[in-house]
Image (tube, grey):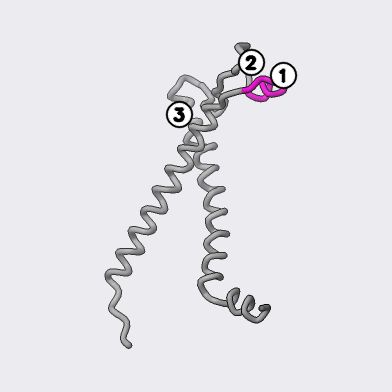
Amino acid sequence: MMGEFKKFIAQGNVMDLAVGVIIGAAFGKIVNSLVNDILMPLIGLLMKGVNVAQQFIALDGNTYLTIEEAKSKGAAVLAYGNFLQGIIDFLIIAFVLFIIVKQANKLKAQAPAEVK
């Protein structure tokens, strides 16, 4: 069983997958920074200084200045600003992956057929 496991791990596909997961995690950090540090402040500027990520609705009917304050007082909150930020993250990652897959398919179609 251990021999089969070593053979499985040593296969190129498993190693490629591991590298892909690590690069994907690093890419996720880059996209999060792009959204949090560049796009959301610009969107906030367009919305006259509103921090989109801090937009929320307290479900207890009270008014709070921040999400953290509402949560510390035990209020349930709908953090729709965080949700919007997550959607933007997803759309950027999905678009970049679309471009990568499209280019990979184009390269694969242009590559000469393998000789057997």
Sort mark 2 into few (<14), some (14-19) or many (20+) by Cα contacts within 10 Å: some
Residue pointed to by mark 3:
43
Contact check, label 2 and label 1, Cβ < 8 Å? yes
| 81 versus 11 height, above or below | above
Question: What distance separates the C-alpha of mark 2 from that of mark 1?
Answer: 9 Å
Task: Please state the horizontal and vertical placement of residue 4, each as a whole percent of the image.
Answer: 62, 79
- As drawn, is 8 to the left or to the right of 45? right
- Residue that mark 1 sits on: 73
Q: Residue at x 56, y 22 (%)?
A: 56
Q: Looking at numbered disc 2 in the image, what kind of residue is underneath it?
A: Tyr
The spot of residue 40 in percent (x, y) is 49, 32
Q: Which residue is mark 2?
A: 64
- Residue 19 occupies quadrant: bottom right
Give the SS element for disc 2.
loop
- Label 3 and label 1: CA atoms lie apart by 29 Å
| Residue 45 horizontal/vertical position (percent) | 47, 25
Which of the marked residues, 3 or 1, is nearer the chain's N terminus?
A: 3
